[in-house]
Image: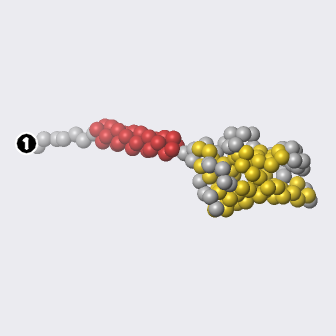
């Protein structure tokens, strides 16, 4: 006497679905963990941000003041002994400005030609190490 076995795909399909859900869930968690470790690159002071070597440089350029804020991994960088030289190009006009520490930022006051489209290059020296950040004012 022969016994007939019926093979159905339902258990296999259920196992495949469970595996797919488990993998998807694990990948979702790893992406969330990775995203929570990232820091925010958005402007904190109304300027424009450039990232160089894990440091965010935020340039705030106004007609009477130029400010540069530095954040490393989302936290302010110690700028007590830092300096910066910012070169700005507005149309055909070029301005060079020396920035000095002022509280939690590097700053210079004066009269500056700044507007949308102004290009700026900041050479920033912190702890004897120079870095260059490039900006376009919005």
Q: Position of residue 48 (x, y in %)?
A: 74, 46
- For the question of whether residue 78 can be seen, the reply is yes
Residue at the spot of label 1: 1
Closer-to-camera residue (20/65) = 65
Work out which quarter of the rendered image holds the N terminus and state it: top left
Q: Residue furthest front?
A: 81
Classify residue 44 as left or right of residue 19: right
Against 84, is 12 above or below?
above
Which quadrant holds residue 129? bottom right
* Residue 39: percent from left, percent from top: 57, 44
> Total marks drawn?
1
* Residue at the image point whose x is 66% and y is 50% from the top: 80
Using residue 73 as the reference point, say whether residue 95 is left or right of it: right
> In the drawing, does residue 120 fall left or right of residue 76?
right
What residue is shown at x 68% (from left), y 59% (from top)? 125
Relative image position of residue 30 (x, y in whole percent): 44, 44
Assign a secondary structure to mark 1. loop
Is any atom of residue 13 visible in this view?
A: no
Residue at the spot 91% in from the left edge and 58% down from the top edge? 93
Q: Nearer the viewer, residue 50 or 122?
A: 122
- In the displayed orientation, state which residue is furthest to the right: 92
| View extreme (bottom): residue | 129
Q: Residues within 10 Å of mark 1 (few under 14, many from 20)?
A: few
Q: Position of residue 3 (x, y in %)?
A: 13, 41
**Depicted 45 relative to depicted 85: above or below:** above
Render colour scheme: secondary structure
Residue for point 73% across, 45% down: 102
């Amino acid at each position: 006497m022969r016994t007939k076995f019926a093979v159905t795909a339902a258990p296999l399909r259920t196992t495949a679905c469970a595996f797919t859900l488990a993998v998807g869930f694990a990948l979702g968690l790893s992406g969330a963990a990775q995203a929570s470790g990232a820091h925010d690159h958005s402007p904190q002071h109304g300027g424009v941000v450039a990232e160089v070597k894990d440091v965010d440089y935020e340039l705030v350029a106004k007609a009477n003041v130029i400010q540069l804020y530095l954040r490393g991994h989302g936290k302010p960088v110690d700028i007590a002994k830092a300096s910066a030289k910012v070169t700005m190009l507005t149309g055909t006009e070029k301005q060079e400005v020396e920035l000095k520490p002022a509280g939690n930022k590097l700053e210079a006051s004066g009269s500056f030609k700044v507007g949308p489209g102004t290009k700026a290059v900041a050479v920033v020296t912190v702890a004897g190490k120079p870095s260059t950040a490039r900006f376009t004012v919005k």
